[in-house]
Image (tube, coloured by chain):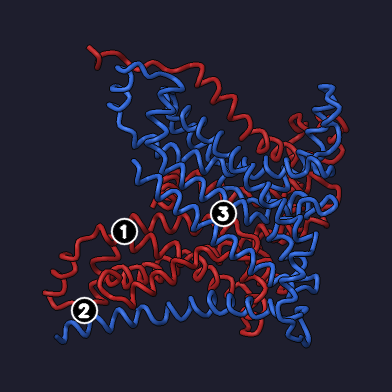
Chain colours: A red, B blue
Amino acid sequence: MKAKVKEKTNWPVMILLILGLITVAFPLYMTIVIALKQPSEMTNSIAGILSLPKSFSLSNFKEAMEVTDFWNSLKNSLLISVITVVLSIVVHSLMGYAVGRNKAHSKFYKFVYMFVVSGMFVPFAILMMPLAKQTAEMGLGNWVGVIILYVVFYMPMNVLLYSGYLTNIPIALEEAARVDGASTWKTYWKVIFPIMKPMHATVAVLTALAVWNDVMTPLVIMAGTGQNTLPLAQLNFQTQFGTNYNLAFASYLLALIPIVIFYIICQKQILNGVVNGAVK
Amino acid sequence: MRNMNERKRTYLLITIPILALFICFNTVPLIRGFIYSFTNFKGFGDYDWVGFRNYVDLFQDPRVGKSYLFTFKLAIVATIVTNVISLILALGLNGKIKGKSFFRGAYFIPNVLGALVVGYIFNYFFTYILPGMAKMAGIDSLSGSMLSDTKTAWIAIVIVCAWQAIAMNTIIYISGLQTVPEDVYEAGSLDGATGWKKFKHLTFPLIIPFFTINMVLCVKNFLMVFDQIMALTKGGPAQSTESISYLIYNNGMSGGQFGFQSANAVIFFIVIVAISVAQMQISGRKEEQL
């Protein structure tokens, strides 16, 4: 009898959730309408600011692209994010494998594991100044340096995730491959790397989101190169927008669009990845 | 035997270069920062050893003290606000509603957006939209910009920080609520547990591990707050919203206080480690009780 009762929708909760969505939607709505308007349409009342634009024009976006060197910044952001994610998956999974398979019986690997993972507690604030000096000395005060730093910064978290995931993969799988005469290196790429695919997805999502939105690292390392990432361009060109808020908002919207598209396409993987990363 | 050696060699060949990279860009700068903290280095030119003078000065510097007070106030208030709202939101989103996945997806959007750009958008909101609304509604106390008043600027920063963090914490709470088996509630309802009682005695104890994760995430992220400050106030008005990270960046990188702010960063590092260790021990103890 109990199973027959169909679950009723809880309408009061439903209505509250819809109202709550306004807090998420309003800032985005505001961004879109202001980005589409001309300064002349921005009357002093907020009704004038928040009303829908009278005519549809993309001229703000065109101008914002020129002012903030949009395509170049987008290219830098994409380049840095994609290379960092690929390197993270390769380097961190290898490290997670070497450390994860040995830390139970080897003091050395146990130490390496603790050493790397405790890097999670090091705030960027303490590394920032020495790193700015160090990367400049090494000729790495550019996007290449930024990528290397990201690979190092996200290593503690990702090695923790990978070596944790490995404990669920039976050693027997590798043993079988070894009996067939495959080297450890080959076994890793043929057997272990493909099996860790769910963890690759988690690592990719977490690393991509963190890198794409990061401001501090490129701000400190790439200062003076004249190159920008998308968020950095917003910071560096802020003064050029002046009081032309329509131009500024067009630029903000341009900076947000790529990640929103990425989110819409990979929503499921992103939500799973974020939860996996946090819970493990 | 040959097999054994091949395996060991491969593991070492993987570990050594990656470990070297990590040491080069994490451990070495950490040590260098520590060394700089005992100098009067300006960021360029010559410098002298000054012993512990930077540390002594640090504890007497009102600006540094103010930034610690502000950062902790922000972190504590934002953590409480974020966790209360996300827990309520998660309970709602896990309830009997239509379009669950739509709501979950929509409520998560703030978290994927970059904090700096979000900060700029809210900057405009606090400067023009909110005072405009307040005037229309006749609320005089809000008719000025929240960001230009030393009493309210920090609240604006809490709101922006929470707006993004709630998205993240809610998702984690939802995954926690999903681990609570249905029969726990059934057993509870036989005992007459409803509403708040049900939450306090049944739901909450079961999701404590998730509560811990959220607390750790929140406190750590909020203590390191930077982007939001950069976009909303740049530390103002009257240096009332300078977070520790912002002060280290601003005065250390361009203010000629490289050595002094290195000492500040060392203290900040110790504070972060102490808090993280304390949190893990407290949460470890709580989970044992279950």
Which residue is located at x 47 percent, y 40 percent? B171
Q: Which mark is residue A183?
A: 2
Distance CA(mark 1)–CA(mark 2): 22 Å
Q: Give the mark toward the camera: 3 or 1.
A: 3
Q: In which quadrant will I find the N terminus of chain A? A: top left
Q: Which mark is residue A87?
A: none
Residue type at tag 1: Tyr
Tell me residue A251's x, y (percent): 72, 51
Closer to the chain start, of discs 1 and 2, is 1
Query: Tag 2, which secondary structure?
Result: loop
Q: Is residue B231 visible?
A: yes
Q: Which residue is mark 3?
A: B220
Residue type at tag 3: Lys
Eyeballing the image, is A101 above or below B108?
below
Q: Give the mark toward the camera: 2 or 3.
A: 3
Residue A263 placement, left or right of A195: right
The chain to which mark 3 is attached is: B
Tell me residue A74's x, y (percent): 62, 60
Tell me residue B9's x, y (percent): 28, 84
Query: Tag 1, which secondary structure?
Result: helix
Distance CA(mark 3)–CA(mark 1): 24 Å
Which residue is located at x 63 percent, y 57 percent? B224
Query: Tag 3, which secondary structure?
Result: helix
Residue type at tag 2: Ser
Eyeballing the image, is A51 above or below A107?
above
Q: Which mark is residue A165?
A: 1
Distance CA(mark 2)–CA(mark 3): 42 Å
Q: Give the mark toward the camera: 1 or 2.
A: 1
The chain to which mark 1 is attached is: A
